[in-house]
Amino acid sequence: MTYILITRPLTASQQLAGQLDDLGMNPIIMPFYTFTERDPGFDLDAHWSGKGRKLAVFTSPRAVEYGLPHIASATADMLEIAVVGAATRRALEKSGRQVHIQASSGYTSEDLLELPELAEQPGEAVIYCAPGGRDTIAEGLAGLGWSVTKALIYERVSLSPSHAQLEELDSATELISVWTSVAAIDLAAQSLPAILWQKILASPIVVISARIQQHFQTLGATRTELTEGPGNPDIFEAIIDLTSEPTGNLKNI
């Protein structure tokens, strides 16, 4: 039986696990962090000067969840909203907000920064994110002339695998693991027993970005598969492709 180690945050992991259960696979849900609200340390709504372009950048549905409460209705009418990824756009539109700037293709920070409208008459930009994140967007916008502030409105809280989770991972024979953030990789490398971490590196790994793929390769991963997109449907298709290969192509540990 093929075991699928899913390291996404809990809700997304559970949704993907349900799909895999239906196919007779054995998902192991093991998120390495969760999220909690964070006080940004200043009044975000009073931050805007009232002059020039005002850009609010949302980089994930989570940023929408924790960031929108900091924007008053009167302020929202003055803002241009930029997003990274279709899921972030859907979260904003579900909350009744209009998205003004999004890359027509791709879902990375680099895709957003390539848009020519961001180079025109730069003003003030606030990026709603967690500590330690979105440096690429912040540096890219600053390079285009924007005055950039990071609104650190939520943060990661690390989680440790349970004994039962570790036992299940240890017993897995055919293993595929799923990774959607560098933070989860680093936490796993620090918290997992060395023999289990090496087992992951020696098995097929599904990742959602070239940056995560490169990070794994520097750690010694033997096989990484890049998905077409960041969502569960893309991850699911990548897993199906891997498990449809001839018997023996998956690493038996």
Image (cartoon, grey):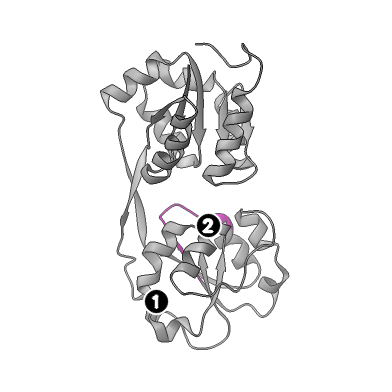
Q: Residue at x 47, y 24 (%)?
A: 24
Q: Name the residue under label 1.
A: 71
Residue 171: x %, y % from top left: 39, 14
Q: Residue at x 47, y 63 (%)?
A: 91
Residue 62: x %, y % from top left: 42, 57
**Mark 2 nearby-residue class (10 Å; few <14, some 14–19, many ≥20):** some
Asked whether residue 127 is in view, the answer is no
Asked whether residue 124 is in view, the answer is yes
Tell me the tag on residue 27: none
Q: Is residue 88 above or below residue 224?
A: below
* Helix, strand or loop for disc 2: helix
Asked if labels 2 and 1 touch by Cβ distance under 8 angstroms, the answer is no
Q: What stretch is highlighted in magenta?
A: 126-136
* Helix, strand or loop for disc 1: loop
Assess whether residue 141 is covered by the magenta stretch: no
Q: Is residue 164 above or below residue 10?
A: above
Question: Where on the picture, by quarter, is residue 120?
Answer: bottom right
53 to the left or right of 103? left
Q: In whole angstroms, how far apart are the C-alphas of marks 1 and 2?
A: 20 Å
In the displayed image of the protein, which residue is found farthest to the left? Answer: 163
Residue 38: x %, y % from top left: 31, 60
